[in-house]
Amino acid sequence: MDITRIKQMAGEKAATMVHDGMIVGLGTGSTVAYTIEKLGERIKTGLCIQCIPTSIQTAMRAMNHQIPLTSLDLVSHIDITIDGADQIDPTFQLIKGRGAAHVREKIVAQVSDLLLIVADQSKCVSALTGPIPVEVIAFGLYPVILALKKMGGTVIVREGQKKDGPVISDNGNIVIDYTPDFLFDPVLLESVITMLPGVVGCGIFSGFTKKTRVIIAGDTGCRIVPAQSEDNGTGLI
């Protein structure tokens, strides 16, 4: 089975976990795109939900499928957020941000009751390694780059596609990718990076493990994987 079909299975499975009346956070990326498409189909047959997108791209996709949108100004919490990840460790600490939406995704995750991550098996790793996306205001770009290099590792300013210059986030900031050259504690490193003046946020998600569940898709189907500490055996869904 090809990777496109695997992503589709994971994204569509997540859409079946959304119920009437829910406020739903919608992440950014190719797997969640299939969730959005499936939710659009369910809305046409009577599903009543409101969604909060984490990027302009996701908002456009949702509107194309006639999915009602709301905002964090109008709701007190989110029932479920469906999102992807670049790396997932056994305790459900994550690295996110390949789509440069990690700051908005982290805000949405913070106010969500459940964070449902959809991914293929290749995203599961024994330990997070990077690259770690870091969103930085332009004025602080070079001081942040120097600080990260002093910590050890490589820093690359992410280049835009079909444009000259760096990737600019939906928040108007520059995105860089930091790859540490050492094994790291995700909780500690997230805190250190976030505290650097000029950093808006980084792609380590270490604070949501207790409310995170992961749908993994592979050649044999989809399964919900428990965190390592909860593992009591899982089967295909």
Image (cartoon, rainbow, N blue to C red):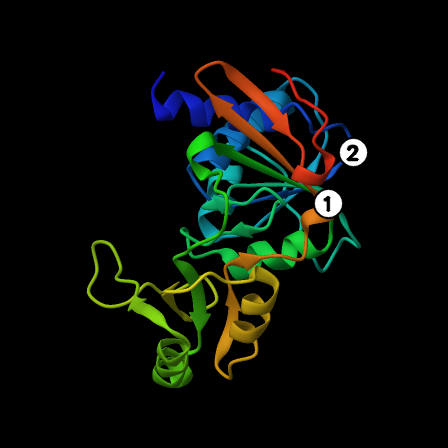
- Which residue is rendered at x = 35% and y = 82% of the image? 146
Tell me where residue 87 appears, x and y as whole percent: 47, 46
Which residue is at the front of the view, 133 or 147?
147
Residue pointed to by mark 2: 21
Query: Distance of mark 1 from mark 2, alpha carbons?
Result: 20 Å
Give the residue type at disc 2. Gly
Rendering coords of residue 60 (x, y %): 47, 44
Q: Mark 1 touching mark 2, by CB under 8 A?
A: no
Looking at the image, which is closer to me, 227 or 58?
Answer: 227
User: Which of the 4 image quarters holds residue 80?
Assistant: top right
Q: Residue at x 42, y 71 (%)?
A: 173
Residue count near mark 1 (Cα–Cα under 10 Å), binned few <14, some 14–19, many ≥20: some
Q: Is residue 164 left or right of residue 187?
A: left
Please report the residue visible at 56 percent of the width from the left and 66 percent of the height from the top.
Answer: 190
Up-down: is 191 above or below 9?
below
Q: Residue furthest front?
A: 183
